Amino acid sequence: MEMFLPIVMFIIGIIVIIKGGDIFVDSAMWIAEITGIPKIIIGATIVSLATTLPEFFIASMATIMGSPEIAVGNAIGAIICNTGLVLAISMIAMPVEVEKKRFMPRAFMMVVSMVLLLLFSTDGNINRIEGVVLLGLFVYYIRKNIKGAKKSLEIPDETAMTIDEISVRRRVKKREFAKHIVVFIIGAILIGCGARLLVVNAQIIARYYGVTEGVISLTIMALGTSLPELTTVLTSIYKKESGVAVGNVIGANILNITMTIAASSILARGGLVLNSRNIHIFNASFISFNQTILLDIPVALLLMLLIILPISTNGRYSKRNGIMLLSVYIIYISFLILII
């Protein structure tokens, strides 16, 4: 009974974050509908920003409250969950075709960001200068996508809009602008409140059960904050819009590194410290190792490579690709449970 209230508050935090994420995603999809920007660009920028805000708020809050394990664990755990579970479900549910010329530059940046993070982590600390470098990649990524979006509007994509249609969309956009600003603020408040509930109660639960904050953030918290991405993917499956699903996951992975971890490392005094931990199997303590460097980041990098290879060869994902991703995810989570 002692843990009943913290567990309930933890669950409420997840629900509040999901609701805030839903509001953001709805606004993003409205923008896609009104502007006619290609869906993979919308997925990789606006939707990704919206669905990555839970991780961003949680990591920032955890850093300020002195829990760097939660900050790093939630961001990397979300990447693993987004790729190994969320995107895998999309591939298993239906064949996913992706336009290579739009996918590959974003996929390349995703891998570069992760490799940089791995290099910055080798000394067990991600300092402020390294955080600024990652944040620079974030700025570059957003500018690149905005430039691509503008170009696509100048030269309409597969939806050949007439001048009248564009004019109508712009008038609608102006009328609805104030409404979506209010929605944006409400969503931000909900996500911020939910993040605080998650962090505070995750700390309490971790201390009570003797589980590290890092493991909780990599598993339960990562799954909870990845629910907006899962919602987006399930919606895109229903509407048969695979571009949104893939673009959303790729974009969210990039932003979790270049926005979430970058901001946390800048906020943290002395940088983000990556703590080592002992491996415990069947209550026996074995070697001490840095889990982030030797397990979490390599698994995330492996999953990224597994989603790039099929597109680089034949431009589509099959059910087999999804099963492979899901298998890696299940093995990873099983190992985490085993070493707790």
Image: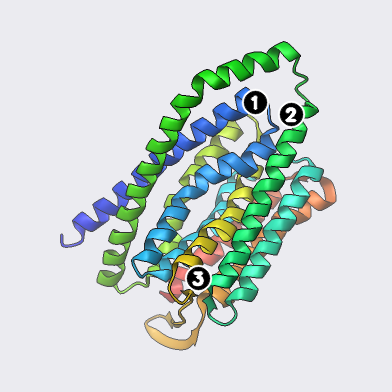
Foreground label between 3 and 2: 2
Cα–Cα span, label 3 and label 1: 45 Å
- The residue sitting at the top extreme is 164
Please rate how many residues cluster around mark 2, counting C-alpha atoms within 10 Å: few if below 14, some from 14 to 19, many from 20: some
Residue type highlighted by circle 3: Phe
Q: Quadrant of the C terminus?
A: bottom left
Residue 153 image label: 2
Q: Quadrant of residue 210?
A: bottom left
Q: Are marks 2 and 1 in contact (CB under 8 Å)?
A: yes
The residue at the point 40 percent across, 37 percent down is 185
The residue at the point 65 percent across, 75 percent down is 119
Foreground label between 3 and 1: 1
Please rate how many residues cluster around mark 1, counting C-alpha atoms within 10 Å: few if below 14, some from 14 to 19, many from 20: some
Q: Label 1 belongs to which residue?
A: 35
* Residue 68 percent location from the top left of the image: 42, 70
- The residue sitting at the left extreme is 1
Q: Label 3 belongs to which residue?
A: 335
Of helix, strand and loop, which one carries label 1? helix
Query: Who comes first in sequence, dot 3 or dot 2?
Result: 2
